[in-house]
Amino acid sequence: MRQLYTQALLYQREVSIKETLARASGSGAFSLQEPAMPPDSLETLMLRRRADLDQARRALGEVLQVEHAAQRARDSAEARIVAETRLAAASDSDSDVERFARWLPRGQAALQAAELVLAEAADATTHQRAELNLVRQAVAATETLLLRRQEEQRASE
C-alpha cells in the first residue's frame, strides 16, 4: 500500500515538474532562457515563481514525511527480527526455535519490502529536492531580471 502511495507521489511530482517547465517555457519544452514578456509582467512571473516555490517546499515536506514513515517501518521490521532472534536463542524449547525458523523468512521478506519502500521514498525525496532547487533558481533568475529592470529605470531617470 505504501509502495503505491509512494509511486503516486512520484508520478504526481513528475507531472507537476513537466507542467511547471512547460508553463515557464511557453512552448511545452524545457528552456533555460526566460520567456519573452512585457516588463510589467515580471512582477506577475515573480508571484507565480514564489507560489511554485511554496508548492515545492510543501511537496518536499510531504515526501520527507513519507520517507520518515518508511524509515520507521524498516527499523520496526529489523527490530522485530532482532527480538525474535534473541527469544529463540534464549529459549530451551525446540518448538520455539522451530517456530522462529518458520517465521524468519516472513520477517526477512517484511524487512526487504520495507527497505524497498524506503529506497523509493528516498528517491522521491531526492527528486523533490532537485525540483525545489530548480524552482529556487527560477526565483533567483526572476529576481535578477527585476533588479536589472529597476536599475535601468533608475539610470534612465
Image (cartoon, rainbow, N blue to C red):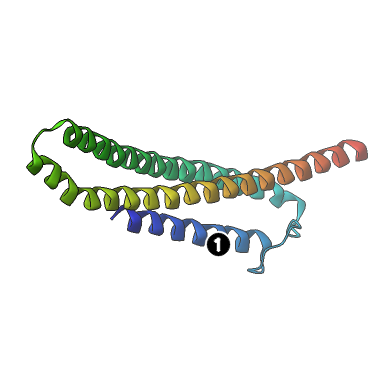
Query: Which residue sits at x=76%, y=60%?
Result: 36
Task: Tell me where residue 109 appears, x and y as whole percent.
Answer: 28, 53
Question: Where, quadrant-wise, is the C terminus in this rendering?
Answer: top right
Q: Secondary structure at mark 1?
A: helix
Kind of residue sitting beneath label 1: Glu
Query: Which residue sits at x=73%, y=41%?
Result: 143
**Residue 31's image quarter?**
bottom right
Residue placed most toward the observer, 149 or 116: 116
Q: Is residue 81 left or right of residue 100?
A: right
Task: Tell me where residue 103 appears, x and y as whole percent.
Answer: 18, 49
Say which residue label 1 marks: 19
Q: What is the number of callouts on the image? A: 1
Query: Which residue sits at x=39%, y=59%?
Result: 8
Task: Tell me where residue 13 appears, x and y as whole percent.
Answer: 49, 56
Task: Tell me where residue 127 appears, x and y as whole percent.
Answer: 54, 51
Residue placed most toward the observer, 10 or 119: 119
Question: Where, quadrant-wise, is the N terminus in this rendering?
Answer: bottom left
Residue placed most toward the observer, 33 or 86: 86
Q: Residues within 10 Å of mark 1 (few under 14, many from 20)?
A: some
Q: In the rendered view, would you say 60 is above or below 5?
A: above
Residue that sits furthest to the top in the current view: 90
**Residue 73's image quarter?**
top left
Q: Is residue 50 left or right of residue 33?
A: left
Residue 94 can be seen, yes or no: yes
Residue 43 can be seen, yes or no: no
